[in-house]
Image (cartoon, coloured by chain):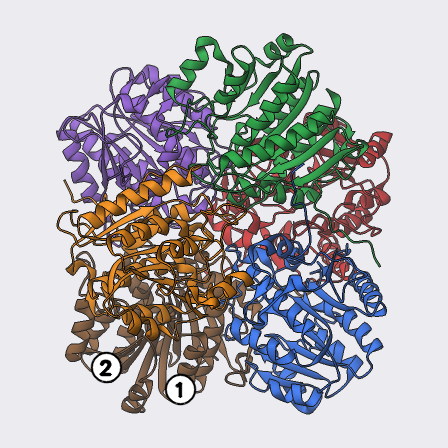
Chain colours: A brown, B purple, C green, D red, E orange, F blue
Amino acid sequence: MNKNILSAKFLGCDSDFKSSDIVIFGAPYDGTTTFRPGTRFAPSIMRMDSIGIEAYSPYFDADITDYSIHDYGDLDLPFGSPTRALEMISETSQHIFDSCKMPLMIGGEHLVSLPVIEQAAKKYPNLHILHFDAHTDLREDYLGEPLSHSSVIRRAWDILGDNRIWQYGIRSGTREEFYWSKEGHTNMCLHNFDTLNNAINTIGTLPVYLTIDLDVLDPSIFPGTGTPEAGGVSFLDLVNALKAVSKLNIIGADIVELSPHYDQSGSSTAVACKILRELILTMKNS
Amino acid sequence: MNKNILSAKFLGCDSDFKSSDIVIFGAPYDGTTTFRPGTRFAPSIMRMDSIGIEAYSPYFDADITDYSIHDYGDLDLPFGSPTRALEMISETSQHIFDSCKMPLMIGGEHLVSLPVIEQAAKKYPNLHILHFDAHTDLREDYLGEPLSHSSVIRRAWDILGDNRIWQYGIRSGTREEFYWSKEGHTNMCLHNFDTLNNAINTIGTLPVYLTIDLDVLDPSIFPGTGTPEAGGVSFLDLVNALKAVSKLNIIGADIVELSPHYDQSGSSTAVACKILRELILTMKNS
Amino acid sequence: MNKNILSAKFLGCDSDFKSSDIVIFGAPYDGTTTFRPGTRFAPSIMRMDSIGIEAYSPYFDADITDYSIHDYGDLDLPFGSPTRALEMISETSQHIFDSCKMPLMIGGEHLVSLPVIEQAAKKYPNLHILHFDAHTDLREDYLGEPLSHSSVIRRAWDILGDNRIWQYGIRSGTREEFYWSKEGHTNMCLHNFDTLNNAINTIGTLPVYLTIDLDVLDPSIFPGTGTPEAGGVSFLDLVNALKAVSKLNIIGADIVELSPHYDQSGSSTAVACKILRELILTMKNS
Amino acid sequence: MNKNILSAKFLGCDSDFKSSDIVIFGAPYDGTTTFRPGTRFAPSIMRMDSIGIEAYSPYFDADITDYSIHDYGDLDLPFGSPTRALEMISETSQHIFDSCKMPLMIGGEHLVSLPVIEQAAKKYPNLHILHFDAHTDLREDYLGEPLSHSSVIRRAWDILGDNRIWQYGIRSGTREEFYWSKEGHTNMCLHNFDTLNNAINTIGTLPVYLTIDLDVLDPSIFPGTGTPEAGGVSFLDLVNALKAVSKLNIIGADIVELSPHYDQSGSSTAVACKILRELILTMKNS
Amino acid sequence: MNKNILSAKFLGCDSDFKSSDIVIFGAPYDGTTTFRPGTRFAPSIMRMDSIGIEAYSPYFDADITDYSIHDYGDLDLPFGSPTRALEMISETSQHIFDSCKMPLMIGGEHLVSLPVIEQAAKKYPNLHILHFDAHTDLREDYLGEPLSHSSVIRRAWDILGDNRIWQYGIRSGTREEFYWSKEGHTNMCLHNFDTLNNAINTIGTLPVYLTIDLDVLDPSIFPGTGTPEAGGVSFLDLVNALKAVSKLNIIGADIVELSPHYDQSGSSTAVACKILRELILTMKNS
Amino acid sequence: MNKNILSAKFLGCDSDFKSSDIVIFGAPYDGTTTFRPGTRFAPSIMRMDSIGIEAYSPYFDADITDYSIHDYGDLDLPFGSPTRALEMISETSQHIFDSCKMPLMIGGEHLVSLPVIEQAAKKYPNLHILHFDAHTDLREDYLGEPLSHSSVIRRAWDILGDNRIWQYGIRSGTREEFYWSKEGHTNMCLHNFDTLNNAINTIGTLPVYLTIDLDVLDPSIFPGTGTPEAGGVSFLDLVNALKAVSKLNIIGADIVELSPHYDQSGSSTAVACKILRELILTMKNS
């Protein structure tokens, strides 16, 4: 028979688990999203639309098909029980770390980053976090609930403590969150990546987990997200930031908060796919 | 100043709590929805678009502005914790029942009906349930979770037992659910309302809670829902069923599973508003 | 050069004014629409999408290309001044009647029918009106304004008086409108065309103006309208009604209230195009 | 690691080729579509959304997971070369027939049925065709091109000749097509399935290929298609027709012309998935 | 009962009229819009979606909940009669000025600014106008109609005369409009805010009315408007302009021409909400 | 009768063929588009929406109505046969060149540029090509097919050879394409127009054909295209590039790859209309 194209792998990521350094998996969970849900659809839509982009990046002058990357697929996460969903993500990322591979997770809402960060911190006690986002995500809780997409970095701070979290592109949050950060708990760069070199120089060769909330991008180029925040960075800003941090020792990463149905043009999904491609190359070059 | 139109009440439902027989409230929760979320937006969009329909029903030859109805607004329900959300709905409906009024809840996903049914059963021990839906909703659990939109009627059966639940319009479910019903646990009428008189005659003057999953309607007239199921009833079928059951002693009701963003034409929302109008008249005439 | 397809004529209606019996023109006005505007786009979108339907009707076993029909294009109507817009429509329809041709107008909101009816009544003093609609359109005024889409038939009654207006498919209005009609001012058939033969037999060979508000159709088949009203007639119901009234002496007609952008599937526009095709054949056979 | 859900199989169709009687494959080609393209997206979207329906059919009281069905995936068809695309479909269907299995193809535009019919006719010289469609598809050519979605049944007639093709639900075409059929070349039932028993009785035990253009359904329930034609059959009409023809000896089938992006509600895709489920059960019961 | 969230106030603007300095009201009128209507929906959609933004602005380091702001709701304006609609807006703004408060109006189309400017000029004879817009809005009339969204600033000039109107971001109009401005009638800065300091220095402490047509923003960040004009300013450009003019003595302001349905992503509405937040802080700091 | 507005001409381009220097025609073909089709709708939607822009350009301080431009309409191109479609475009452009006029074609996919380039090269043997695009379009073939939207510039190179093609804004392609260009076959400027003066200085007074794939624009301002590529140029970048190249001797041009349905806001279409206006002024000033 003719060659078929039945495939649910992200573009070119068709190596097996064993031979791969990077393991992609989807965490299609948006159960604590308060305003507009839909990030649960991101991993499957990204895989389907990834055929619309090229495997070659002119930014890195590199091609993801040169590398061995495994796409594990999506976890089957239960809605209505964030605790169980986070446990399942935790187990998966632990297995990937235990196998000496790097997890590259596609969310889902930002809360899904928490269990991966927990596992990363277990394996790498001197872990630093690079956090690209429009939102502070530093709430102590949301309506009394400590596990929320808007408190995920605060929970990471519970694990890591002061001086370990670097936040870039931030432009939305409560006054309390901004002031709490200023007290020295996190390093926050408002609006853009202007002080990214501070992080790079300080972190040096220490292990870094990179969590990218795609709403760090300006809604002009990325309207497909639940809470678009104008005043963000451009696509090239983000690609340049990735190139800059490719010098660091990245041990895992994620890309979250694409809500594909909010951008019927498909452009936001295409952007997410290209950022994932660049992120893979960032990890391979780090 | 000129008269303003700042109002978040459903069309014509602007009486105060005390003087009203029927109390409308919204339960904008879709936290256990597995496939396509969005019913959280139903109550607010229905209120906003209710100005597009008339208060007068040619079907009942009656006008909802002839009655005193209170619109309490929406409960502020926490996503990520179905248990707490259900508790809040439970407290609200208990208060309404305790005040000798009839709750009329706008969902949200179907799970929100459960706490209202629990409170209704507490107040009316010989309660019967009329269930209009495309889906059986009789699963023992969903992925191990007993509290789910797809098990809500099974949970109601846990409370009420056999011969108290009458299901109409059903056309989707697992084989197990259909067979379990046939064992005598519920009275199920597939596809339509053909045997509705059986329920009416059997129930007589006993108290009835009416729960309407709007996906009982055919997706041709109601595509704005998470899991559209072709082969459903028409709008006039549903209005006629309401007129028929207006003879019964209805003590509370709900209307769930409108997901307004899935129907950009606004037609599904307009249908939901008209069904709510007819449902009010059904309750006032019952 | 190759044959081009630069054409803004409705499918097959490319005869010149002089040789045509029927003159199509668009009245892209929705200036009094209260709820959801957009019918202004109907004539141009219908022309563009008319290439998607066939010129042959299996219902009439006839082809519109067998006849000479002129498409005059759209009037350039000023928004912000309903009086001037109606004057321009009035002049255009007078010219068509004076030329002994039949106007076939594409709305726009329903108010645009009024000046054509006025001109028709001037030329044919014993005019009857057939009105297919979901709405009564019998308000004395709307917010104090006598010229409104929701009072157009009442304004027609001002001209024609009792026993001259036959309304079909009606299912929405205020109580006052329904009761006013029942006092004998208009002949109203609720929900459907069940008593259409009454009109046909009574009118006999007298001149008839046929005004079709497309929202007479059920929103399942015609969601692309500003105020969708469930419980309407099917496409075949409407085609059969047209076949029935083709025995009458129709001297002009219109088709109003398509709001194409509310139905992104294009299906409502396709329905409107087919109804226009059938309407042309109805007029040619009457 | 936790169980993943990386799967591109249609719901429950995960048997291997060898052990399966039915082989599903996608032909995502719409290269000759004149008006509105997009059926190329149907197979992949149907697979993704098939998780939203149940495997159990209350119409057949049967479950597709009881059977062994293989989903081969999509052919990688070249746009810009219909001839090569048809060759690839031809080779694939020949291989399936040669393996004594039944092809069940998901289109794509209707032209993709032609090579499967050719292979079916080669294997079963006394083949009959059941054709459910809104359109005649009997044009000699389209703009001079004999291979077109609007001439596919005419091309099938070139192979099979008179009295072998049974058309149901037809309501759109040129006058020439309707008259050509009436000359005795095909058996055509306008608008519905009223005379389906004629086909069933005549065909008896002879081999039948069933080709379903989903636009046979009314656009109210199936707006997601390039050329919606009002006046079609309902979902239950089509299911009942399938149950009726399940007595026949069906040796292959297809389902074409879903254009999922034209129905943003997802309802048309859900309908297509359910029809595919019923079609599988029809073939297993035939 | 549990706390409800029935509210139609813009985020945090829930003070009563008496205790407030700023009074927000909606003018949902788009009756003279020629091309694509829909700005009538802006005020209600902005209120509903305002829960998606934060009350704290990192640009002003200030929180709108620190201030007393009243949201009066929407005026119930008649379509079909621009004169009457403008009268109602005039009365409302007069009342606000008479109460020594600042009006902050949400349009609607740009014409709604005219009556507020008239009342402002009555109260503050030496009024200046800051006009942020893509369009000149300087037509003498539109199709003979002097009251039009495209002539609103020309009408303001009729009241104020030369040297009182400062236009920024302009990039679309007829040649006549641009040349008329250059004759010295208005101060116009093409494309951006480069010469904003000229206005600030010239105006000094004189009273200023600020009218923001949101289409001054580039359509990349603000596609949700009737007449998108590429080449506009960024969100940060506009925020910086607001910070700059916060030194002026602003006595009233408006924000017009959001047409929310044209941007299904909701991003344009979110931008409008944030600009309204910044505008409030601009007025409080001026 | 009143003046009508039945017109299918692009804004202000209503001169006859004979008296015009520039001849606009549409090539609504997307038959080789692999990923997401829809550019076939661009010419007709652009004409319809062109009434939403002004004829006057503040960038050129010029008005297109000052010039004589003919809009020929769209070619009626057969889908399913790229060869025949290209022939028809070839004949049309030959006729325009033979009449000593400049063709200005609206695509369609990029492949439609090939026959115009062929005719241009026949008439102007020392032709240079300016190519603005996100994509290299330099593939030797696509799935074995030499005629493809992704190989159109490679085919132009087959005709013109080295040093005649100048590519700007490029940011997507295979590694092979980028490296092949670097071997000296084309002059490629990545991402932007930074080296545009190189082309201008080198080409001097030689004849230039300008082909603009609108996806050279960033998807933030132009999401309405089949393959959006982030990291592109802004609207003002493109307008400035046009002003720069207006010094050259442009003998023909095209604008391709608008897929209007992918941007429901209409903003991409408005951008395309304005670029076409600026392109006309560029050609008139060259």
Q: Chain of mark 1?
A: A
Q: What amino acid is labelled 1 in the image?
A: Ala
Task: Measuring from the top left, give residue D52's x and y in whole percent.
Answer: 46, 47
Q: Residues within 10 Å of mark 2 (few under 14, many from 20)?
A: many
Q: CA distance from mark 2 to mark 1?
A: 18 Å
- Nearest the eye: E8 or A53: E8
Task: Measuring from the top left, give residue C237's x and y in whole percent.
Answer: 60, 24
Q: Is residue A18 above or below residue D159?
A: below
Task: Measuring from the top left, give residue D198's x and y in whole percent.
Answer: 74, 26
Quadrant for the C terminus of chain D, please.
top right
Q: Are marks 2 and 1 on the same chain?
A: yes
Residue A244's disc is 1
- Residue at left 17%, top 80%? A184
Q: Quadrant of residue A112?
A: bottom left
Residue B102's disc is none
Residue on which the image places disc 2: A164
Q: How many marks?
A: 2
Q: Quadrant of residue F160?
A: bottom right
Q: Secondary structure at mark 1?
A: helix
F239 sits to left or right of E205: right
- Nearest the eye: A55 or F197: F197
Q: Chain of mark 2?
A: A
Query: Which one is in front in this view, the residue at disc 2 or the one at disc 1?
Result: 1
F34 sits to left or right of A81: right
Q: Is residue F28 above or below residue D136?
A: below
Q: What amino acid is labelled 2 in the image?
A: Arg
Residue B283 visible to the viewer: yes
Q: Secondary structure at mark 2?
A: loop
Residue E46 visible to the viewer: no
Q: Is residue E168 above or below residue C77?
A: below
